[in-house]
Image (cartoon, helix red, strand yellow):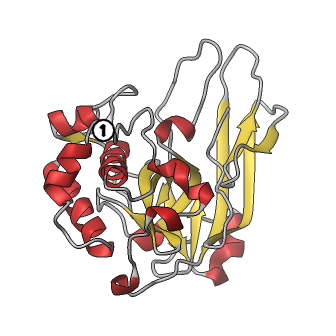
Amino acid sequence: MFQISVSENEHQTVVEESFETDPPLAIEHCDSNASGNRLARLVSPPGPLEVRYRAVVELNQNLVDPSFLKECSFSDIPAEVLTYLNPSRYCESDRLGEFAWNEFGALAPGHSRVSSIVDWVHNYLSYVPGSTGPSTTACDVLVQRTGVCRDYAHLTITLCRALGIPARYLAGYAVELQPPDFHGFCEIWLGESWYLVDATKLAPIAGLVRIGTGRDAAEVSFATIIGAVDLADAPQVLAVPVSMAQIDGVAEGTGAATVGGDAVSIG
């Protein structure tokens, strides 16, 4: 099962896309949850398998005056958002409650406190590729002080939830991310909507493209393999900005791209 297709919502629209395998296989495409996560399921015979996904995505990120973004009282949090207050596999907010309140409880509630948490995680952790694994949790990261993008997101989410602020994990693509790869970031519920944050600060917020949404990375794995598989090569991921006028050229595989556009080419 592959979760690499871009999701669609009010902030991003898939202009065109392709999902192919070599050798050609039957692919079942389905939505895996109410957040618009899109799953591709296939059965591969023994032998080499190559999966290729490409899309052009139009982004419509809203900019809001941060001073208007307030934390929502528990009684006003929508029912569908409540689940993002709970501890989850990688985000043990119940274990870090005292730490979160001691560190951030005295700060003024709202966007400024969330920004302080994001800045704290960014400064506290060192980004070290390979320093964590599939079983590393937010508590582990807090102790060892190293991690990768998913760990930054998990710790940010955990601290926010511990303070009663709904937070959820996003898997996606990121324009200008170096080196290019899949990216993990998160959303925080403020006022009456979700807002993107990224404690790694490795890519601009305006260039983040959502693949999937979940309580943590366990729910938005890029690939779930049933059976014995050896990874022959590291995934090759690229997200570049393009102008709308160039979309036809990009879709045809010319590779044209310019910085400063309002669309993103994923490949």
Q: Residue at x 75, y 33 (%)?
A: 41
Residue 132 falls in image quadrant: top left
* Residue 267 shows in this picture: no
In-front residue for pair 24/77: 77
* Above-or-below relation of 150 to 229: below
Could you say where residue 173 lies in the image, as x and y percent from the top left? Answer: 50, 56
In this view, the residue farthest toward the right is 26
Name the amino acid, label 1. Ala
* Above-or-below relation of 109 to 167: below
Q: Is residue 116 left or right of residue 204?
A: left
* Residue 33 shows in this picture: yes
* Above-or-below relation of 145 to 259: above
Q: Is residue 90 left or right of residue 79?
A: left
Could you say where residue 1 lies in the image, as x and y percent from the top left? Answer: 68, 32
In this view, the residue farthest toward the front is 75
Q: Is residue 32 left or right of residue 209?
A: right
> How many residues crowd around disc 1 within 10 Å: few (fewer than 14), some, or many (20 or more)?
many
Residue occupied by mark 1 = 138
Could you say where residue 247 lies in the image, as x and y percent from the top left? Answer: 67, 74
